[in-house]
Amino acid sequence: MIRQLIAIVLAAFALNALAAVDANQASRAELETVKGIGPGLSAKILDARGSGAFKSWDDLVERVGGIGAGNAARLSQAGLTVAGSAYSATATPGAKPAKAEKAAKNTKAAKGNAKAAQAAAAGG
């Protein structure tokens, strides 16, 4: 009987330890229970939250310096949520278009270099 009671109490503590911490509602101490969030980052989150609740992970990443897509994924896995939602790569649509834009610029530059080489060969 006592073993069962101890097991139940330990299970309750384990579930509380894994409980999600929402960036919009957590205190500084609660934020710092998330692996990867220390005093500096928790202060940045609270400062940014002072101007309004975070609408999404994109909003948090944009407003809090030091949190990028990689950190957001790690913090989410450690239990941080934004507006009750876990981070997903699709939550940041800006990440993929930026890569696509860079690739397009590289393609344009390569085409420009090819044209310049052809012009130099034809003229010389």
Image: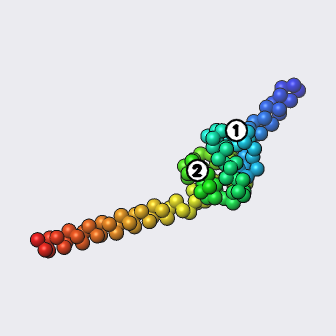
Is 82 above or below relative to 97? above
Is 123 above or below relative to 69? below
Residue 93 shows in this picture: yes
The amino acid at mark 1 is Thr
- The answer to whether 40 appears left or right of 7 in the picture is left
Q: Secondary structure at mark 1?
A: loop
Residue 113, horizontal then vertical, whole percent:
26, 67
- The answer to whether 12 appears left or right of 76 in the picture is right
Residue 90, horizontal then vertical, whole percent:
58, 60
Residue sitting nearer the eye, 54 or 46: 46
Which of the image's four quarters has the N terminus? top right
Residue that label 2 marks: 65
Which of the image's four quarters has the C terminus? bottom left
Residue 89: quadrant of the picture: bottom right
Residue 109: quadrant of the picture: bottom left
Distance from disc 1 to disc 2, alpha carbons, whole Å, reads: 19 Å
Question: What residue appears at the point 28 percent right and 70 percent down from the top-left corner?
Answer: 112
Question: What residue appears at the point 76 percent right and 50 percent down from the top-left corner?
Answer: 25
Q: Earlier in the sequence, mark 1 or mark 2?
A: 1
Query: Dot 1: within a 10 Å radius of its alpha carbon, few (fewer than 14), some, or many (20 or more) residues?
Result: some
The amino acid at mark 2 is Gly
Residue 37, horizontal then vertical, whole percent:
64, 41
Residue reaching furthest top? Answer: 2
> Tags 1 and 2 in contact by the CB under 8 Å rule?
no
- The answer to whether 65 appears left or right of 45 in the picture is left
